[in-house]
Image (cartoon, grey):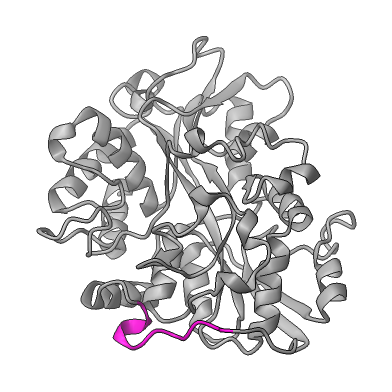
Amino acid sequence: MKRSSLRRSAIVSTIAITALAVMTACGTTGGGGSTRAPEQQKLGAMEGTVSILAWPGYVENGSNDPTVNWIGPFEKATGCTVNSKTFGTSDEAVTLMKTGDYDVISASGDASLRLIAGGDVAPVNTALLKNYAGIYDFLKLQKWNSVEGQSYGVPHGYGANLLMYNTTVFPTAPTSWSVVFDKSSPYAGKVTAYDSPIYIADAAVYLMAHKPELGIKNPYALDDKQLAAAVDLLKAQRTNIGEYWSDYLKSVQSFQTGNSVVGTTWQVIKNSVATGTPVDVTVPEEGATGWSDTWMIASHAKSPNCAYAWLDYITSPKANGEATAYFGEAPATQAACDFRTDCDAYHAGDKAYASKIWYWTTPIAKCVDGRTNVKCTDYSAWTTAWQQIKG
């Protein structure tokens, strides 16, 4: 199944935009300007149930595939019955968390800061999690899962937005993203790109390398001039785009039929194309964007102890290995690779490879690159820009 219903759409809910406005006004303390939820200091008795909101494929109980079940062992070990709901976009996830019906959420970087800003998630006391120590250091206390040195969750899995290319069309691997931007016209109608406002960051990564005069230091921290440059690049690209994709299965099919010959992809897409399809993937010299998903606990969780139990369990070697393999991404711990055979394909634990990835981070008005003399554009501005790009 993996990311079969994964759609991170371009439509941001009013609630999500409001949360970003709060973050802009109040800095990065979270909680809508009020005192943030307290960090839990110790564990208590299990409540008997836990409600989990997650990407498809993260919370499997054997109903989709009898051989894929990491919920059963968790329930048996903790006595916490899992009630789960999947979502299709980060925007949908942010809205659902506002209901207060969920104890835990798996959040990507384009949602996590919104959840913190809205006061929807609580700080996480990692000292209460025995498996936290084993998580790769380069995934901990990052801009998308912490604020001012305070952890707001535990990493689950990560991956890069790669460049996939048809090896017949490109006998030699492309070394630059220019084949989908400045030099995409020879492949007009067969270029593909990810369908989301966060894709603007991909253009920003390219501009960082090729137009240093713009002064872009972080692709998620764009002032008005820098955003305008990224938008111009994407509008020029638009004439050569054959398909924007958000459902990975459609991307698989497009490369299999030859309708797409070059464009943004995930490793799971490369792994899913039919045997014999002439495609390969690479990380171009400019680097790439990517995702690192984080398990977060609701600020008013009804079952906080079961929530902590889930965070600890899902980052245990066997569970993390199984869940991330099923989903199609690198695990959060090296020990998880003992329960997988494909960690090398996902570059698990490769710090040098990971350093090339700019992980999705919610754009906010307070520049995440540290600048204080300008105001950066937030996610609502990116959403408006994306609608203009696509027309």
Residue 13, percent across and down? 40, 72
Q: Residue at x 55, y 44 (%)?
A: 159
Q: Locate residue 116, reporting x and y percent.
A: 41, 74
Image height check: is 384 above or below 193? Answer: below
Give yes or no for residue 83 being in the magenta stretch: no
Span highlighted in magenta in the image: 30-41
Residue in front for this viewpoint, 284 or 234: 284
Q: What number of labels is visible?
A: 0
Q: Is residue 93 left or right of residue 383?
A: right
Q: Main secondary structure of the magenta part?
A: loop
Q: Residue at x 18, y 31 (%)?
A: 211
Q: Position of residue 21 (x, y in %)?
A: 26, 74
Residue 58 picture quarter? bottom right
Residue drawn at x 37%, y 82% is: 31
Please report the residue visible at 58 percent of the width from the left and 29 percent of the height from the top: 255
Q: Is residue 140 above or below residue 50?
A: above
